[in-house]
Structure formats: C-alpha cells, structure tokens
Image (cartoon, grey):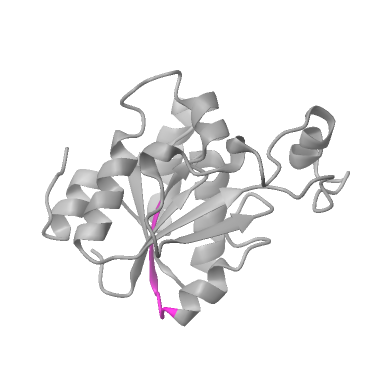
C-alpha cells in the first residue's frame, strides 16, 4: 500500500477546525493519532498542512465566496491559535508544516516543492473536511500524477452523508480508500490504539 516514497498528509487538523467539527468528543482525534504513529513507525514522513492568512487578509479576494466571509467575521489569521495544528496531534521536530491560502493543500503553499525534494510519489491523505481539503487535494494530486491513499476514518466532514458518498463512491476512482487500521497493517505496524 505504501512505500518509502510515501508521505502522510495531516490536513487542516487545526484547533479552530477541530473545535467546529468534533462536537467536543474526546475520541475524535484518535484516528489521526493512530495514522501519525503508524506513519512514524514505518519511517513515512508526516507532513502537516494548515490554512491561515496574514493580518488584513491580503490573500482573500472579494470574489471568493468561501474565504471572503472570513474577512467579515475575522479569524484564521496565521498567528491565532485557531490556525495552529491541534496539540493532540502536534508535529515533532523535523516534521514539515505547510501553510496554505486556499482549500487544496497545494494552492498557495510550498507543498509540491517539498514533495519533489523528497521524491515523494504517494500521498496518504487525512483531513478535515472530507468535502473540503481532502476532496480538493485529492483532485489536484491526481492531476499531478501522485498515487493516492485516503484513510477514510481519519477524514471528517460536517455532513456524514457527504463524507460517505465521497469515500465510498467518488474517491475510489482516483485513490485507494482504506482505514487507518488496514493501512497500519499493510505497513507491518498494526493497529496502535
């Protein structure tokens, strides 16, 4: 399933987004913790992607319906805690943390440069939300000819039905969709928690 040219992407698992989606569940981040540990145990680079903007939102166009709302209500400025990776899945020294300015992990970031420098050809995708960063990154990564694996239980969405349709019906045409436990087993590290 994975090889030494794989990278695990932990996308938008940041404090402000986890708070909005988790419903206060203490177990919500368990799949991400397990995926990160499995990746580390298999010597697969863990790369974090988070969304954030500079003060004053110079990256946000009034034409962008999704992001222009942020300029009205505020939040998600790079320096705020809402944009930081959630402490329960915090990066280790040496992990790459990429800041993006749009929905896809590639748009407005240096992710592709980092992937090329490490000769990564396979991306293992996790993130919040399935219909946002995971979908957008999967589509763009597929167009860039990356091999793709989606860890369905380490993806979450506000709408469970949208998550189900994407992971069961849409993603399989461009990616291998599996669970964290199945992926960990394929790496020879088994389930961790």
The total number of labels drawn is 0
- In the rendered image, is residue 178 in sight? no
Q: Percent x, y for residue 18?
A: 49, 31
Residue at 19 percent across and 52 percent down: it is 184
Please give left or right for residue 118 compared with residue 6 in the image.
right
Q: Does the magenta stretch include residue 49?
A: no
Residue closest to the eye, 174 or 95: 95
Q: In this view, does 119 lie above or below 157?
A: below
Q: In this view, does 66 lie above or below 35?
A: above
Please give left or right for residue 82 compared with residue 77 in the image.
left
Q: What's drawn in magenta, residue-wise?
A: 118-125
Residue at 20 percent across and 63 percent down: it is 42
Residue at 36 percent across and 28 percent down: it is 28
Of the 4 image quadrants, the one containing the N terminus is bottom left
Residue closest to the eye, 55 or 109: 55
Q: Does the magenta stretch include residue 119?
A: yes
Q: Percent x, y for residue 130?
A: 48, 40
Residue furthest to the right: 62
Residue at 44 percent across and 70 percent down: it is 146
- In the rendered image, is residue 89 in sight? yes
């Amino acid at each position: 399933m994975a090889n030494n040219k794989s990278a695990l992407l932990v996308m938008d698992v940041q404090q402000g987004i986890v708070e909005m989606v988790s419903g206060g569940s203490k177990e919500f981040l368990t799949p991400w913790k397990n995926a990160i540990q499995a990746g580390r145990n298999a010597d697969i680079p863990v790369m974090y992607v988070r969304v954030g903007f500079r003060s004053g939102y110079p990256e946000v166009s009034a034409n962008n319906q999704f992001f222009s709302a942020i300029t009205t209500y505020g939040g998600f400025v790079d320096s705020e805690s809402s944009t930081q990776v959630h402490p329960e899945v915090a990066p280790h020294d040496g992990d790459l943390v990429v800041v993006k300015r749009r929905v896809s992990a590639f748009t407005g970031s240096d992710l592709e440069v980092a992937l090329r420098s490490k000769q990564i050809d396979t991306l293992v995708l996790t993130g919040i939300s399935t219909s946002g960063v995971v979908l957008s990154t999967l589509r763009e990564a597929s167009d860039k000819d990356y091999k793709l694996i989606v860890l369905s239980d380490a993806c979450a969405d506000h709408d469970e039905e949208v998550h189900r349709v994407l992971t069961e019906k849409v993603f399989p045409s461009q990616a291998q969709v599996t669970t964290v436990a199945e992926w960990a087993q394929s790496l020879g590290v088994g389930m961790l928690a």
